Amino acid sequence: MAEAKLDSTAAMKVVEKLTADLEASYEDGGIKEDDEIWVKFVVGGKKKHYHLEEAAKGTSLSQIAEAMVPKEVCFFVVIVRGNDEDGPLRTYRTVFLYQAESLSVSQRGKYSFNKNSVTEMNLGASINEQVDREAIEGGWPMNNLQTYLKKVKVNAGAHSVANYCFGADEKME
C-alpha cells in the first residue's frame, strides 16, 4: 500500500470510503467474508513533522493483533456491522490504539500525535481503547470479541439491531 502522508481530514475520508464500500457490498448480497472492515494508520515522520500513513486493511478483527508490530505507533478504525433480517446495514466505528513499546525517548512524541489524530477525526467511536503487548500476548482481541460487540449494541441505543459482527464469522452470540 502506498504510504501517502495524511492529515486527520484525509484519514477520515479513508474511513468514510471504507464505510461506504461496506454499505454497497451489503446491498449487493449481504455481509461477505472478503469485506474489508478495518484500516490501519501508522504515525510516520520525525519530531514536529509527524503525519499519518494508511498502512493496511483487513477483513476480520482477529487480523489486527498481528498487524500491531513493535516500534510502530498506530491506530485501527474498525467498522462493526449491524443489521436486522429485513433492514439496512448499520455501521458503528471502533478504534484501537497501539502505543508501541521499545521506542526511543525522541520517538515517544508519536504517542500524543496518535491520540490527538483520533480525537481530531471525531469518529464518534463506540469503543476507543488502547492495546498493549501484554494484552496481545494474552489473546487479544478474540478474548474480548463478545464484550466489544455487546458494548457496541449498548452504545447503539435507539439504533440497535438484532445482529452484530466484525468479520463475517465474528458475530455476537
Image: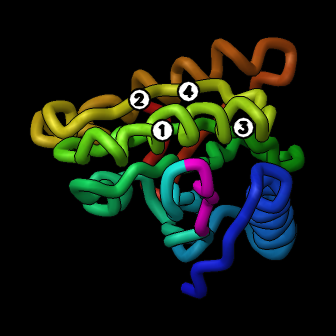
Marks 2 and 4 sit apart, C-alpha to C-alpha, by 7 Å
Q: Position of residue 90 (x, y in %)?
A: 80, 42
Let me know if residue 26 appears in the view.
no
Secondary structure of residue under mark 4: strand
**At x 76% / y 64%, what residue is drawn?**
14
Mark 2 residue crowding within 10 angstroms, few (<14) / some (14–19) / many (20+)? few
> Mark 2 near mark 4, Cβ–Cβ under 8 Å?
no
Tell me where the magenta segment starts and ends, as one range.
Answer: 48-53
User: Which quarter of the figure has residue 142?
Assistant: top left
Seen in the picture, residue 105 relative to 71 is either above or below; the reply is above
Q: Which residue is mark 4?
A: 128
> Mark 1 near mark 2, Cβ–Cβ under 8 Å?
yes
**At x 86% / y 14%, what residue is drawn?**
158
Mark 3 residue crowding within 10 angstroms, few (<14) / some (14–19) / many (20+)? many
Q: Position of residue 9 (x, y in %)?
A: 85, 53
> Mark 3 near mark 4, Cβ–Cβ under 8 Å?
no
Q: Which residue is mark 1?
A: 96
Q: Position of residue 80 (x, y in %)?
A: 62, 43
Report the amino acid beneath label 1.
Phe
Quadrant into which the N terminus falls: bottom right
Mark 4 residue crowding within 10 angstroms, few (<14) / some (14–19) / many (20+)? some
